[in-house]
Image (tube, rainbow, N blue to C red):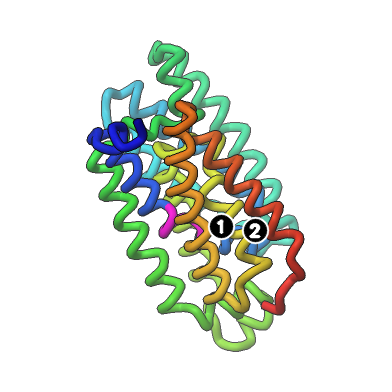
Amino acid sequence: MIAELLALVPVQRAGFGLLLGAIALPPVGVLIVGLDIYPVRFAIMHVALLGSATGLLTGTDPLLWALVLCALAGGGLAPFATTPAGLSGAMGLLMSLAIAVALLVLSISGVNANGAFELLWGSILSTRPVDLVVLAVLAVVIPALFWWRRRDLSLLLHDRELAACSGVRTGPLTTALLVVIAVSIAGAVKLTGALLVDALTLLPALAARRIGRGLTGMVVASIVIGLVVAVAGLLLALALDQPPGPVLVLLAGVIALLAQLLPMRRT
C-alpha cells in the first residue's frame, strides 16, 4: 500500500519537499530559539497567509506574494530589535493587521472553504516544482549562512552586546536573520500550512538544544531531527491515511518532549 503511494508523483514531490524543508527549516528554528523571538513566527505566519490570500485574489502565484511580503515584514521588524520595547509590540501589531487584511482579502476573493483550509493546514500533496526550487535554494543558502558566519552568529545568539563589542555588525546581521526567518516560514507554508509550521522549524530546534553542543552542534542536530521527522512523519501519515501536517507536528512534539528529559548540555 505504502509502496504504491510512494510511486505517485505528487507523493514523491511531497517527500522531496519535506527532505529539503528538513534541511532548511530546523536551523531557522535555532535562530528563533537563540534570539528568543518565539512570537515572530506567529506574526510571519499571518503575513504568509496574507500573501497567499493576495495571490488568490489577483490570480497570481500565492507563494511569490508570501515570499515578498514576508521578506518585507522581516526587514521591517529589524529596527525594533534594538528598541527598549523590543519586537513584542511590533509583532503583535503586525500579526493583528495581517490576519485582519488576510481574512478580508479571502472574503473579497470568494475563495472556497477548501482553499482557505489549505492555507491554514497546508496542502503537501499539491507541492509544485516551483515550491521545490524555493525549498532547494533555502536548503543551500541557510546552512551555508550558518557555516560562513558561524562565529558572528554564535556571539550574537549568546549576547548581543558582547557581539557588538567584538566587532560584529549586529544591526545588519539581525536584519538579515529576520529576513531569512520570514522567507523560510513563507516557503514552508505549502508543506505544513500556516498553523503547523513549527513541525519543521521550532520543535526540532528545541530538541536539538538539549542534544547539540555549541551552535554548529545544535544546527546539525536540528537537521538530523528534522530529517527523521520528515521521513517517519510522511510514512506514518501514508500508513494511517491521515494528513501529513498534524502527524509531523505530533511526531516532532514527541521527540522534543523526550529530548527535554535529557540534561541541558553546555552551549
Residue that numbered label 2 is attached to: 206
In this rendering, is residue 50 above or below 76?
A: above
Q: Which residues, given as a range, are shown in magenta?
A: 22-26
Find out whether the residues at labels 2 and 1 contact each other: C-beta distance under 8 Å. Answer: yes
The residue shown at (62%, 81%) is 163
In this rendering, is residue 82 above or below 59?
A: below
**Quick one: 221 or 110, which is closer to the camera?**
221
Q: How far across and down, in percent of the image, does residue 240 sit?
A: 49, 29
Q: Residues within 10 Å of mark 1 (few under 14, many from 20)?
A: many
The residue shown at (65%, 47%) is 254
Q: How far across and down, in percent of the image, does residue 214 sit?
A: 61, 78
State the predominant SS element of the stretch in magenta.
helix
Which of the image's four quarters has the N terminus? top left
Mark 1: which amino acid? Gly
Mark 2: which amino acid? Leu
Q: What is the distance, in whole Å, between disc 2 and disc 1 at their CAs?
A: 8 Å
User: Residue 12 colored magenta?
Assistant: no
Q: Residues within 10 Å of mark 2 (few under 14, many from 20)?
A: many
The residue shown at (62%, 57%) is 80
Which of the image's four quarters has the C terminus? bottom right
**Quick one: 78 or 99, which is closer to the camera?**
99
Closer to the camera: disc 2 or disc 1? 2
Q: Which mark is residue 188?
A: none
Residue that numbered label 1 is attached to: 29
